[in-house]
Amino acid sequence: MSFAAVIFDFFGTLTPRTPPEVWDEHAARSAAPLGIPPRAWRAALDDSFPERAVGALGDLRRTLRTLARRCGAEPDEAALTAACEARRAAQRELFVPREDALATLDGVRDRGLRVGVLSDCTVELAESWSSLPVASRVDAAVLSCLEGRRKPDPELFATAARRLGVRPDRCLYVGDGSGDELRGAAACGMTAVMLCASDPEDGAVRARRAAWTGPFLTALSRLPSVLDDPSALTTEPRRDSPAGSGPRPG
Ligand SMILES: [Mg+2]
């Protein structure tokens, strides 16, 4: 089976994985103008992710006002504006693609395949999407906060295929595996591949990789050659396999 489209996850796939200490530092930046302790603000952000990822809290200003109230604060308009600016600036740092991401997208397009992105994301990515360097290389972006659904909802995957004009069984889905996305993609009929890039790992990442029995890519840059020879997918070494040639995670 040759592929007609590649659909990419965004965070941790087209972008590098974000270490936990960065999330703390980012939360502190938008907590400051609101006068909310950074830990409480980080918890409010984390706890509300399921709502924010399906767009349930509205635009960024409304979202931050709601979360501030949940923390017992009632920020004035100037404080909210400053918090929104701090949040947008911090989030933009997370939208920077991996070193090999843009060339990989170009390599997919050069082969005549369609390119999709399917992301569990909040309103900040939706607001910024059209200005990002990846956007001009993507034929269809399906963002959870605009769709009102999260991975692994099969309808999200079906939506991505439909917008690309490609049958699911001719789509290759590439993701780091968060949000149970690989199961969702496979359930929709796509071929799912886990990206195991050399980002810092934690227990959750190691567990996810150990549980995945499907094909792996060790770098996005390997994708174009896999498209030239799809059988190469099955020969990717598993980084956590004693038999694999890659390094074992520490
Ligand atoms: Mg991801």
Image (cartoon, rainbow, N blue to C red):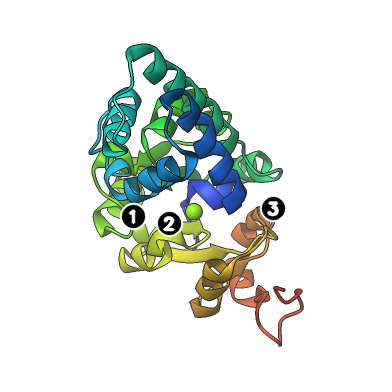
Q: Secondary structure at mark 1?
A: loop
Residue 28 horizontal/vertical position (percent)? 53, 36
What separation in Å lies between label 3 and label 2 (alpha carbons)?
18 Å
What separation in Å lies between label 3 and label 1 (alpha carbons)?
25 Å
Q: Quadrant of the C terminus?
A: bottom right
Above or below residue 234? Residue 110 is above
First of labels 3, 2 by sequence position? 2
| Viewer-nearest residue: 5 or 27 | 27
Residue at image location 44% in from the left, 44% down from the top? 42
Label 2: how many Cα within 10 Å (few below 14, some 14–19, many 20+)? many
Q: Secondary structure at mark 3?
A: helix
Instruction: Tell which tag, 3 or 1, sits nearer the viewer.
Output: 3
Q: Amino acid at mark 3?
A: Ser
First of labels 3, 1 by sequence position? 1
User: Circle 3 sits on which residue?
Assistant: 221
User: Circle 1 sits on which residue?
Assistant: 167
Q: Amino acid at mark 1?
A: Arg
Label 3: how many Cα within 10 Å (few below 14, some 14–19, many 20+)? some
